């Protein structure tokens, strides 16, 4: 009867009389494995021949462990020791020889001494007076559990009592209550015509053929809302999800993405073109990673280098400069870029050179999101490598008010409101502002930096005098920590990252 076709027949036949209240008990009646029965129930439920409910029900159950089954078959350790002691007083070695299992004797003696039914004197074991009334209650309990004798509540208590002996265990067993389904074959149980399965394996060609022959009713119903199997691999890192979302926001606002495909840059593009003096602390080895191979780069526009040197040393375009001797050797040193503003500088230079050639100024908005590198001490909010988001707008007669309005528009799109602006200093922007927000707890938190690029930076590039460039930037990791409520950036990167977080974290929806 254990064949699948017989199980399905017995289920359908039983439902003619009444519902099957417990699939576990029904499997025992049929003498089949419950899992085999559950498989058949699933097939019949798919065809709506039966209805087993949306979820399995739970019931308590008790079963013997492998050790418990062994004791049931050969006797408990204490039972076997007491059986051997019927031959008279013995040493431990004599008991081991009599029983034939040293481990059983060791365990049995411990229990018998604990129960005070054996005494030991000079290495010889003897039965005490209490041994006459002793009964092997554990063996009786094992038999009850094996035969499922009595109420389940009593069996659960027995298994709990025996838990320390590891011979029985309490379980939560799944079972189903089964009733007739909407396609139950009321008049065709015996002839088994309901066993004819509908077509489940079909493609577009087969659908056309079935439609022509008017046999679409033979097609098995398809649940188009069913979810696919959960995929464990290929999860996108939460930071990359945020990166893509911010990228899309920039594009929606009409920004053009800049090419950021170079991590190594010369100090000329990374510092000097931004009007950062060569003695600035940011250019020290304590803050910047210098590249040793190749250590320098000499391929710079000659006229642009000349104008940049002049602006630094003596000033130009209304500026007095920094009044120091500018070093060509210093400007040629290669570094891992410390900010994506180097990319902005290169882009603005290209715009300026096009203006010089054509007289046409390419106004517009530009952005970049990519990695930058700084030789910083790592702590819970700082890494040596992180992502910087940056945007700038180039046009005629832009003002600080334009920048503040643009910042409010940008940050509102990413869910950051209540912006506050604080005056700040940057070598290459004037005026400069830190951008802050008030958190839900009332704490003021910095979310970015901004400013208007200085003429000392723009005019050597070839840009006209009345052109203004407003710019701002922020760190992507700080945004991620705020969104995911992380206390440390190391919860986002490195060996402390919780993998389930990487799999389940979603980008914010604003």
Image (cartoon, rainbow, N blue to C red):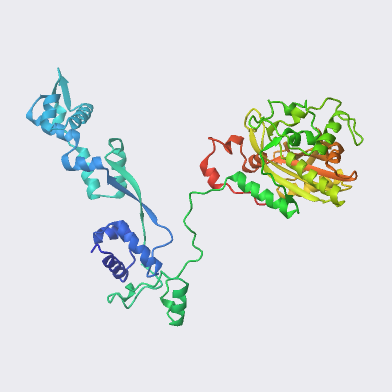
Q: Residue at x 45, y 71 (%)?
A: 203
Q: How many marks?
A: 0
Quadrant into which the N terminus falls:
bottom left
Residue that extends furthest to the right in the rendered view of this protein = 318
Q: Residue at x 44, y 78 (%)?
A: 209
Query: Would you place residue 355 above or below residue 338 in this image?
Result: below
Where does residue 232 sit, x and y in percent of width and height?
48, 49
Where does residue 26 sit, x and y in percent of width and height?
29, 60
The residue closer to the viewer here, 248 or 354, is 354
The residue closer to the viewer here, 455 or 93, is 455
Question: Is 57 on the left or on the right of 120, as rendered?
Answer: right
The residue closer to the viewer here, 96 or 503, is 503
The residue closer to the viewer here, 362 or 22, is 362
Which of the 4 image quadrants contains residue 33? bottom left
Q: Residue at x 73, y 33 (%)?
A: 267
Residue 22 visible in the current orientation? no
Where does residue 57 sit, x and y in percent of width and height?
39, 56
Where does residue 419 sit, x and y in percent of width and height?
77, 42
């Amino acid at each position: 009867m254990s064949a699948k076709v017989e199980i399905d027949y017995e289920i359908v036949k039983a439902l003619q009389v009444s519902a099957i209240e417990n699939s576990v008990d029904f499997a025992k009646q049929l003498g089949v494995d419950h899992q085999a029965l559950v498989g058949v129930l699933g097939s019949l439920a798919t065809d709506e021949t039966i209805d087993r409910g949306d979820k399995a029900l739970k019931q308590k159950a008790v079963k013997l462990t492998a050790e418990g089954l062994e004791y049931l078959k050969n006797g408990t350790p204490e039972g076997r020791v007491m059986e051997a002691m019927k031959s008279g007083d013995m040493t431990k070695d004599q008991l081991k020889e009599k029983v034939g299992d040293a481990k059983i004797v060791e365990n049995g003696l411990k229990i018998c001494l604990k129960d005070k039914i054996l005494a030991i004197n000079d290495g010889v074991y003897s039965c005490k007076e209490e041994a006459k009334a002793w009964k092997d209650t554990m063996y009786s309990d094992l038999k009850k559990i094996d035969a499922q004798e009595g109420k389940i509540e009593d069996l659960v208590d027995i298994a709990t009592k025996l838990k320390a002996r590891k011979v029985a265990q309490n379980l939560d067993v799944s079972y189903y209550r089964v009733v007739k389904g909407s396609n139950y074959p009321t008049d065709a149980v015996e002839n088994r015509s309901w066993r004819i399965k509908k077509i489940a394996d079909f493609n577009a060609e087969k659908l056309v053929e079935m439609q022509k022959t008017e046999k679409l009713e033979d097609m098995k119903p398809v649940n188009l809302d069913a979810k696919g199997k959960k995929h464990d691999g290929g999860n996108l890192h939460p930071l990359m999800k945020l990166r893509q979302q911010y990228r899309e926001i920039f594009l929606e606002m009409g920004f053009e993405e800049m090419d950021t495909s170079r991590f190594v840059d010369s100090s000329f593009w990374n510092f000097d073109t931004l009007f950062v003096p060569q003695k600035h602390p940011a250019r020290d080895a304590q803050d910047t990673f210098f590249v040793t191979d190749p250590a320098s780069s000499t391929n710079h526009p000659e006229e642009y280098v000349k104008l940049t040197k002049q602006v630094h040393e003596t000033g130009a375009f209304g500026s007095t400069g920094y009044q120091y001797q500018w070093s060509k050797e210093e400007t040629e040193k290669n570094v891992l870029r410390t900010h994506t503003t180097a990319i902005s500088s290169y882009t603005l230079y290209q715009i300026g050179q096009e203006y010089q050639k054509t007289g046409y100024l390419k106004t517009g908005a530009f952005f970049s999101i990519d990695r930058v590198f700084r030789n910083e001490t790592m702590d819970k909010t700082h890494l040596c490598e992180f992502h910087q988001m940056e945007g700038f707008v180039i046009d005629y007669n832009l003002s600080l008010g334009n920048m503040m309005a643009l910042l409010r528009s940008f940050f509102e799109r990413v869910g950051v409101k209540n912006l506050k602006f604080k005056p700040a200093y940057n070598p290459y922007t004037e005026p400069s502002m830190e951008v802050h927000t008030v958190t839900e707890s009332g704490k003021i938190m910095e979310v970015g930096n901004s400013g208007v690029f200085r003429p000392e930076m723009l005019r050597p590039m070839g840009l006209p005098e009345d052109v203004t460039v407003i710019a701002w930037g922020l760190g992507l990791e700080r945004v991620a920590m705020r969104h995911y409520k992380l206390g440390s950036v190391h919860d986002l990167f490195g060996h402390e990252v919780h993998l389930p977080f990487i799999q389940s974290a979603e980008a914010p929806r604003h």
